[in-house]
Image (cartoon, helix red, strand yellow):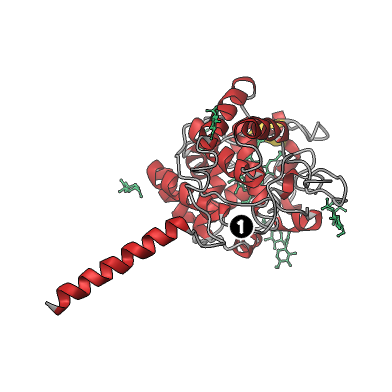
Amino acid sequence: MFSTNNTYYHSLVATILLVLTFVFPSEGQLSASFYSSTCSNVSSIVRDSVQQALTSDSRIAASLIRLHFHDCFVDGCDGSILLDVDGNITESEKNAAPNENSVRGFDVVDSIKSTIEASCPAVVSCADILALAAEASVSLSGGPSWNVLLGRKDGLTANQAGANTSIPSPFQSLANITSKFSDVGLDTTDLVALSGAHTFGRAQCQFFSQRLLNFNGTGSPDPTLNTTYLGTLQQNCPQNGNGATLNNLDPSTPDTFDNKYFTNLLINQGLLQTDQELFSTDGSSTISIVNNFANNQSAFFEAFAQSMINMGNISPLTGTQGQIRTDCKKVNGS
Ligand code: HEM
Ligand SMILES: *[C@@H]1O[C@H](CO)[C@@H](O)[C@H](O)[C@H]1NC(C)=O
Ligand SMILES: *[C@@H]1O[C@H](CO)[C@@H](O)[C@H](O)[C@H]1NC(C)=O
Ligand SMILES: *[C@@H]1O[C@H](CO)[C@@H](O)[C@H](O)[C@H]1NC(C)=O
Ligand SMILES: *[C@@H]1O[C@H](CO)[C@@H](O)[C@H](O)[C@H]1NC(C)=O
Ligand SMILES: *[C@@H]1O[C@H](CO)[C@@H](O)[C@H](O)[C@H]1NC(C)=O
Ligand SMILES: *[C@@H]1O[C@H](CO)[C@@H](O)[C@H](O)[C@H]1NC(C)=O
Ligand SMILES: *[C@@H]1O[C@H](CO)[C@@H](O)[C@H](O)[C@H]1NC(C)=O
């Protein structure tokens, strides 16, 4: 009798709390239904735009997810990478070392923003557009879908020095890369899963040519680079050639989002030094994660979706912080 009442009151309280959570989402918390009453079709607008862009640029899906990554690693996912030098912005993230002449897709983001403004003016942030475009890019390329958490505001500042130091470099050791992920609250599983985004897109010769001839002062190529693949790369990236020449990050299925990135690592066919290090660093806890993702695509897809949510949760501005930019390139009123 007492225990029945107790259960009744517990479920009543639980129901009230559940209702309150939906009516007043707590500040600082993103939510999949954030735009359900203000711009209910925002995900389909973004998806349609990415699909359209893919018809003329097979690389754009890869470029768009990379923008979200480079946004989130610098002062959180606040759209700061999108700001041009203008008004109070004297140094842009676009011009930071890891981004200049490398990140792309800004024109597509602007076009998505204009389409959204036409349907739902001044309610959807540029930071959320990057998160939605990342998911659309992956799912349209054959990868997993997930419910994107939304409600980020756009920042008022850009941090070029932060972009120079916080974004991982392809010349670093696994220990250094791991610590950059841990600085933003991401663990080793996140590192391995998110590196799987190198299953599509391109990289310039200058970002791996140090592996091809005289690696790390040894006078020989990187010993963890497959010799057959080495030959192909040496042809595509000759010494004193153009460092901007593009190569597929995943030579087996260049534009498809699948687990081939991980099976490549098993045969020493990771393109960047930092890719192959995940599998070839003696004693590293990343090796068994690579093996799991190489052997089980569903395990990779599940982990990838979760890690994208984790990355999208890095220090968002919410509630009264920040603003909804009208033009993703500029702070409002500048
Ligand atoms: C783990 C550390 C990482 C390093 C050192 C790294 C480094 C790089 C480099 C050097 C490039 C080639 C850029 C160029 O040639 O201009 C690249 C491309 C790319 N990265 Fe990463 N990356 C890392 C993690 C990630 C993560 C976490 C994601 C997304 C979740 C990602 C997504 C991509 C994509 C999709 C491309 C191809 C972009 C395009 O074709 O436009 N990367 N990355
Ligand atoms: C999207 O929804 C808005 C209202 O939220 C509506 O005005 C607009 O026509 C819709 N656009 C599309 C492309 O469905
Ligand atoms: C970022 O790096 C670039 C290239 O090394 C350099 O020119 C620029 O001054 C750096 N910016 C800041 C703010 O440190
Ligand atoms: C890697 O980290 C170590 C220790 O934190 C540091 O001394 C070293 O300069 C870093 N190397 C690179 C290439 O960033
Ligand atoms: C490069 O060489 C240094 C010392 O010669 C060594 O400590 C370091 O681990 C090497 N790095 C790689 C990636 O092999
Ligand atoms: C190098 O790649 C070939 C496929 O191109 C593969 O058969 C071979 O096993 C690889 N070698 C190593 C050492 O992984
Ligand atoms: C593959 O991974 C999925 C998701 O984690 C799991 O449910 C499934 O049991 C795994 N399959 C095998 C053959 O291990
Ligand atoms: C630029 O900075 C000044 C001084 O902090 C501030 O008063 C002004 O509102 C800023 N302009 C914009 C467009 O944010």
Q: Quadrant of the N terminus?
A: bottom left
Total count of labels: 1
* For residue 54, above or below residue 70: above
Please name whichever residue, 256 or 284, is drawn nearer the observer in this view of the structure: 256
| Residue 272 in view, yes or no | no
| Residue 192 in view, yes or no | yes
* For residue 14, above or below residue 122: below
Residue at 59%, 47% in the rendered image: 275
Residue at 77%, 33% in the rendered image: 244
Element carrying mark 1: loop
Is residue 298 shown left or right of residue 286?
A: left
Please name whichever residue, 198 or 184, is drawn nearer the observer in this view of the structure: 184
Q: In the figure, residue 19 lies in which quadrant?
A: bottom left
Residue furthest bottom as drawn = 2
Residue at 18%, 74% in the rendered image: 5
Residue furthest top as drawn = 56
Measuring from the top left, give residue 232's x and y in whole percent.
64, 30
Measuring from the top left, give residue 210's x and y in whole percent.
74, 45
Residue at 73%, 47% in the rendered image: 81
Measuring from the top left, give residue 279's x and y in whole percent.
53, 52
Q: Amino acid at mark 1?
A: Thr
Neighbour tally class for label 1: few under 14, some 14-19, many 20 plus, Cα within 10 Å: some
Task: Look at mark 1 in the image and give the residue it sits on.
Answer: 318
Q: In the figure, residue 16 lies in which quadrant?
A: bottom left
Please name whichever residue, 186 or 202, is drawn nearer the observer in this view of the structure: 186
Is residue 14 shown left or right of residue 7?
A: right
Q: Is mark 1 within 8 Å of ligand 8?
A: no
Is residue 263 shown left or right of residue 242?
A: left
Measuring from the top left, give residue 116's x and y in whole percent.
62, 34
